[in-house]
């Protein structure tokens, strides 16, 4: 469609290109221009340039360039007419009626944004002024138990959805939105009876924003006990899992100002940090960190401090997350919380100063990775030292600065107790690189993780062994929550005459992470030996022993803080059980 030139010029005159692009990337002055890391391709050195004088941008790395319309088209995935309408609305230019009518897809997109805003107003009202018993419980949970003030609740748009699930639908339909639109943005679900209900009914709601502050979806936490504890909007035209970071819209200025971001796992962790005045924080929305999320952080900072839960699942998430961040060119440090704490509980129990003290002791990525390897592999034997050196080699090979590389070689050699020359020889003889400069692999899995996976594999492969395992192993013997859920499903499906992996995968519809994990366990060749009867008995003992040792460590940490006689009795009983199991193992 032809757009009169005078309208385009008026929009360009009113929209500051630097201000516009600064909403998506961190621009830094460079002479008369501004520079940033390119949002359209991966890079470690800024090659993206914005010229306010010329009103254009250009990337010397990938060749992307253009003006404000081109930029919005690429960032928001819009057509040219849609980008024009998008910017016209932003700067207050009224377009011809014929043109406004032609931009139907943009109008639909903006309508979906308005629908989510309307839902958010409803959820906010239910939380803040609702008179029902469950609304009072939701307020009490957020205010008294979690300590979130009115300011934080408003900034982050916390709300509540009544358990009946009909009020929101009635309101949205009354405002002219259709049932199809409610389903498209992930707010509604259709019951078996064909009734349209609020997906987040009976839950505290967390509005999910993009980096510009627009609501793109919701998450919901069950009020009280129940599973799943959290649910998120499914992928929609406005929201894609793994592309956004919780809280970034409210914290990005603090991240730029303080020059680092604190990355946590959960919504409550991020909210509590913000409440306590630690505002340079974001959350990965409770899912494994993705390359897209790491790239989003890279637009605003060069350093990330990972602060995940102190439990085994948190440690594994830390190992995965730091590798993803490192691949995207970010400097990574790790905060180690005391056992049994997450950032939320640590702050509420110990206060801001104690948290900042921990933050000041954050361990550099390389040192943390080495300590994790030493813990998992040991370093007393020649074989274990070789495994540690090979495990750390990729991180050394990925180090571009020659001085930093030499220091890392020395640090590794001293920590493992070998000569630097030996480390250099290993690096020189073996190829640890991968195409595109990506990191070849993360931290090797601990033995207990592999034992749990192999035990699950035996359940997959052999009905007789499955019966034996289900008879002597409980869900709680597995330490990884994903393994617990898979084993629970296996126990449930074991009553069926025929058990297939397809049945198991069907249990986890919509949960791509667990479906992928099932595929991994079923496909790894090194796990094929798990179907040997003698090995299964050994795996059962390993899994039980690891579970006991984890319980002993957790209880010992608790007893350091409170001298509870009953706790000590439980502790000694667990130790005796562990020693008995060790004797049967040997």
Image: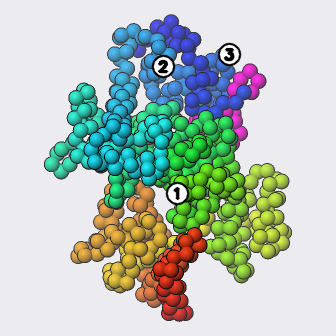
Query: Which residue is nearer to you in this view: 466 or 159?
Result: 159
Question: Which residue carries the number 3 mark?
Answer: 53
| Nearest to viewer (mark 1 / mark 3) | 1
Please give the label number shown on residue 345: 1
Secondary structure, mark 1, is helix
Residue annotated with mark 2:
90
Which is more N-terminal, label 2 or label 3? Answer: 3
Instruction: From the viewer's perspective, tell me whether residue 432 is left or right of residue 89.
Output: right
Q: Nearer the viewer, residue 551 or 507?
A: 551
**Count of labels shown?**
3
x and y percent of residue 193 in the render? 15, 48
Mark positioned earlier in the residue sequence (2 or 1) = 2
Q: Residues within 10 Å of mark 3 (few under 14, many from 20)?
A: few
Where residue 38 appears, as percent x and y from the top left, is 63, 35
Residue 499 appears in which quarter of the rendering?
A: bottom left
**First along the sequence among labels 1 and 3:** 3
Please state, as top left, top right, bottom left or bottom right, where the C terminus lies in the image: bottom right
- Magenta part of the protein: which range? 30-47
What is the distance, in whole Å, between disc 1 and disc 3 at their CAs?
A: 50 Å
**Residue 325's spot in the image, x, y percent?**
62, 50
Relative height, residue 577 to residue 341 (above, below):
below
Any part of residue 381 in sight: yes
């Amino acid at each position: 469609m032809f757009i009169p030139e005078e309208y385009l010029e008026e929009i360009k005159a009113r929209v500051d290109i630097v201000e516009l692009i600064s909403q998506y990337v961190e621009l830094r002055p460079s002479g008369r221009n501004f520079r940033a890391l390119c949002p359209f391709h991966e890079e470690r050195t800024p090659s993206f340039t914005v010229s306010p004088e010329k009103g254009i941008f250009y990337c010397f790395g990938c060749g992307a360039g253009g003006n404000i319309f081109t930029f919005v088209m690429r960032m928001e995935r819009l057509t040219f007419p849609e980008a024009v309408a998008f910017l016209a609305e932003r700067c207050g230019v009224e377009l011809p009626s014929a043109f406004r009518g032609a931009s139907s897809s943009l109008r639909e997109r903006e309508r979906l944004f308005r629908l989510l805003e309307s839902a958010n107003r409803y959820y906010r009202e239910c939380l803040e002024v609702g008179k029902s018993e469950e609304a009072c419980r939701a307020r009490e949970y957020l205010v008294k138990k979690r300590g979130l003030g009115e300011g934080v609740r408003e900034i982050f748009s916390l709300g509540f959805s009544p358990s009946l699930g009909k009020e929101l639908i009635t309101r949205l339909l009354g405002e002219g939105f259709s049932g199809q639109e409610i389903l498209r943005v992930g707010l509604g679900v259709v019951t078996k009876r064909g009734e349209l209900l609020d997906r987040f009914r009976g839950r505290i709601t967390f509005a999910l924003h993009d980096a510009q502050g627009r609501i793109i979806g919701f998450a919901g936490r069950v009020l009280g006990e129940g599973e799943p504890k959290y649910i998120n909007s499914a992928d929609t035209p406005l929201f894609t899992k793994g592309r956004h970071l919780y809280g970034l819209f409210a914290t990005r200025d603090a991240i730029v100002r303080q020059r680092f971001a604190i990355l946590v796992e959960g919504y409550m962790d991020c909210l509590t940090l913000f409440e306590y005045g630690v505002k340079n924080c974001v959350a990965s929305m409770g899912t494994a960190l993705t390359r897209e999320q790491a790239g989003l952080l890279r637009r605003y900072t060069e350093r990330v401090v990972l602060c995940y839960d102190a439990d085994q699942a948190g440690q594994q998430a830390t190992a995965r997350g730091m590798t993803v961040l490192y691949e995207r060119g970010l400097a990574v440090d790790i905060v180690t919380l005391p056992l049994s704490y997450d950032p939320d509980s640590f702050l509420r129990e110990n206060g801001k100063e104690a948290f900042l003290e921990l933050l000041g002791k954050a361990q550099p990525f390389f040192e943390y990775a080495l300590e994790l390897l030493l813990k998992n592999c040991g370093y007393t034997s020649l074989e274990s030292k070789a495994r540690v050196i090979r495990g750390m080699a990729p991180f050394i090979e990925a180090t571009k600065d020659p001085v930093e590389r030499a220091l890392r070689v020395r640090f590794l050699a001293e920590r493992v107790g070998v000569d630097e020359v030996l480390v250099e020889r290993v690096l020189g003889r073996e190829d640890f690189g991968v195409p595109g400069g990506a990191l070849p692999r993360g931290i090797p899995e601990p033995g207990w993780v592999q034992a749990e996976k192999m035990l699950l594999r035996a359940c997959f492969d052999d009905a007789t062994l499955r019966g034996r395992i289900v008879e002597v192993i409980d869900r709680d013997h597995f330490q990884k929550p994903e393994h617990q859920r898979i084993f629970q499903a296996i126990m449930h499906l074991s009553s069926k005459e025929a058990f297939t992996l397809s049945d198991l995968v069907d249990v986890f519809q919509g949960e791509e992470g667990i479906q992928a994990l099932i595929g991994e366990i079923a496909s790894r060749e090194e796990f094929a030996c798990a179907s040997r009867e003698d090995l299964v008995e050994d795996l059962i003992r390993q899994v039980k022993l690891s579970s006991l040792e984890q319980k002993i460590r957790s209880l010992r940490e608790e007893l350091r803080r409170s001298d509870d006689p009953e706790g000590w009795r439980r502790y000694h009983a667990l130790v005796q059980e562990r020693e008995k199991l060790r004797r049967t193992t040997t």
